Each structure stands twice: as C-alpha cells, then as structure tokens.
Image: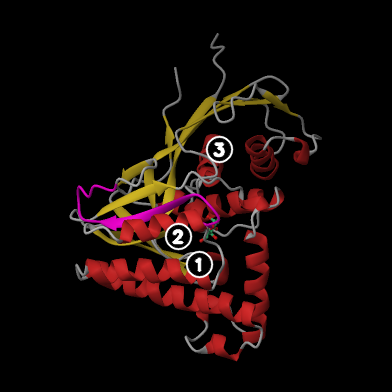
Amino acid sequence: MNSAKPSAAAYAPGRVNLIGEHTDYNSGTAVPMTISMGTEVRYEAGGDQLVVESDLERSAAVVISPCVEIESLVPWVRLCAALVRIAAPGLTGRIAVTSSLPSGAGLASSAALGVAMCLAVGVKPEPITLAQVCQKAEEAVGVPSGLMDPLVVAASLPDHALLIDFAELSTRAIELPEDLEIVVVDSGERRTLSSSVYAERRAECEAAASRLGVPLGLAPQDAPGAIGDPVLRGRARHVVSEVRRVGTFVDALGAGDYETAGGALIESHRSLRDDFGVSTPALDALVEEACSMEAVYGARLTGAGLGGCIIALCRPGAKLDLGTQLWRVRPGGAAHKLAPLA
Ligand code: GLA
C-alpha cells in the first residue's frame, strides 16, 4: 500500500521596481522585475490540523486553527493564515517556508510568500488570479497594497522587466540590455507596510482622484493644478508625473539612451521625496551618493519607501562602495511549482 502523503512545492522570487512607484493602486503603469532571491514553500497534506513552520523569524512551528484570531499571530504566519482562508479553506497538513529574501527591505517578501504558497496549495497558476488572491490576503491582514508585487512575481520572463498597465491589467516584457547593471543597495532601515503611511497615501490619492473625477494614473499632466489642497495636489502630481516617467524610461531603454533612463530614475526619487513624502534621510543620502558616481546613470528608492532599498542603474561592473549590503541583480523568471521531495 502506498502511504505517501500528497505533497507539493513552489518557489517565488522577490522583486525590485525600476520605475512607477505608487502607481499600481492609481490605475497607472510600472516597470518592476523579479530578482534571484526568493521564497520556497513546501506543503504536505495529512492530519487534522494545519501547521506552518519557517526559517523566517526563527519561530517554532505554529498551528493555525480555523478559528484563530489572525491578529494574534506573528506577521508572516498571519499572512499564511489569511491566504489559506481565501485560497484553500479547511486545508490541513504541514507548510514549510524558507526564504533568502530580507523581510521589510522593500523586496516584496510578502508577495513571494503569497504566490509561492498559492501555487503550493493548488491555486490556479494564472498570474492575475494569483495576484488577486495575494492582494485579498494582504488586505485581510490590514495592508491595502496594489497588484504590482504579486503580478510581477507571477508573470515575469527571464532577462526581462515587466511593463504593467494597471488600468488594463495588461503586461509587456521589456528586455533589459546586457550592458546595463541594476544594483540594489539596502539602507538597513526596516519598515512594515502596515505600520507605514501606505494606507494614508492611498486614501490621499483616492481623495485627489475623486476631485479630478478620474484615477490619477489616467489623469492629464496638468490636472493636479486644479486641486486646491497643496498636500493632495502634491500626491496627484507625483502619480501623474511618475506615469510619464515610466514612458520616458521604457522608450529610453529601448533606444539605448541610458542617460535619459537614469534621469527618469533621479526625477522619480525627487518626486517621491518632495511630492509623495515617502523617502527618508538615509534613502536620500544613498541616492545622492550613488548619483555622484561616474558609473551610475541614476538611482531612486524602490518599493513603498520609508526605508528599505534603493536601486542604481549602472555601467556593468560599477564599484558602488556605499558601506552597506548590496546585490547586483538580473531579472529572474516567474514563480513556479517545484518537483516535490520524494
Ligand atoms: C508596495 C506595494 C505595491 C506598490 C508599492 C509602491 O510594494 O505592495 O502594491 O504600491 O509599494 O509602488
């Protein structure tokens, strides 16, 4: 008799966003790409309870009972519990999570966990479906994030970044030239999205959009000028100008004009700092130092901001000694199922 328990495993990468920040929940555009660090989830069915274990926070295995109060769990277990409730209610067995992604560094560790877990527990491997399940789970744990992270994690192609249009929910692979290097520099500042001003920014964007009668990502360039409130005007100006910079960046990359592509990154950082209010002195200092280097075309904070990492667009082999942890990254592929362990 075969007593093997059914099992499944999946891997999902983290991501950096090249440009298009805080545009996803505004029906705008962005150009993220996956990286080679990521998260693996192994699931083994059986038993009458669900146990999760991980190397993430050196925590012991945790039993997730169907009636557990989600708020009482540590963040990564809370997300697992929310995902199971949405994607596979009543699931029993053992889920083991391992990850090479630093959490709170703005490299989409939550999306990697979410997508890998969805694939391991049998959610349809269709990028939009995966991304929407992950977004719902994030909402359930109090993080009203957009679709960018889980969508790029689920839909990327190797050696390409992904241009995403969030109004149409369409994607286009953008080849990343071999003679460009993306360097990710960690500021060491950690943040959790739920405790950040992310939800506040989202609400401000919604307020600005309702004054304009159109989502900010689809508004004309001069539209923000009509908003009386200076804070809301700044938030709108960031989103509207960021969507324009996404177009500039993609065109410049295609034309091999790396100075212009880098310039778009620098402007994006200024806009996130001055109009959107999500930079920090540490991120500003790293961007400034990186941009003063000969081999750097441009740099900006990546992800939600308020800590985490910057990216620098560089000539290959650039020596970026900024005194902090850095990674040279190439676009990885998408999340996928793994052969289960025998
Ligand atoms: C976080 C969110 C994304 C996106 C970025 C900012 O990574 O999860 O949905 O809003 O911030 O661009």
SS of the residue under disc 2 = helix
Q: Which mark is residue 117?
A: 3
- Residue at the spot 67% in from the left edge and 53% down from the top edge: 139
Say above or below: 122 vs 107: above
Relative to 115, 45 lies left or right? right
Q: x, y (%) of residue 311?
A: 37, 54
Q: Regarding ligand 1, which quadrant of the image does it lie in?
A: bottom right
Label 3 or label 2, whichever lies nearer to me, is 2
Count of marks, rendered view: 3
**In this image, 130 relative to 296: left or right?**
right
Q: Where is residue 25 in the image (x, y as percent from the top left)?
A: 57, 66
| Span of residues in magenta | 301-320
Mark 2, Cα crowd under 10 Å, few <14 / some 14-19 / many 20+, is: some
Disc ID at residue 284: 2
8 or 220: which is nearer to us? 220
Tell which circle, 3 or 2, labels the residue nearer the N-terminal end.
Answer: 3
Alpha carbon distance from label 3 to label 1: 34 Å
Callout 2 amino acid: Asp
Could you tell me which quadrant the C terminus lies in?
Answer: top left
Is residue 166 in view? Answer: no
Residue ID for mark 1: 273
Q: Could you tell me the amino acid type at mark 3?
A: Met
Circle 1 — which element? helix
The quadrant of the image that shows the N terminus is top right
Q: Residue at x 65, y 60 (%)?
A: 197
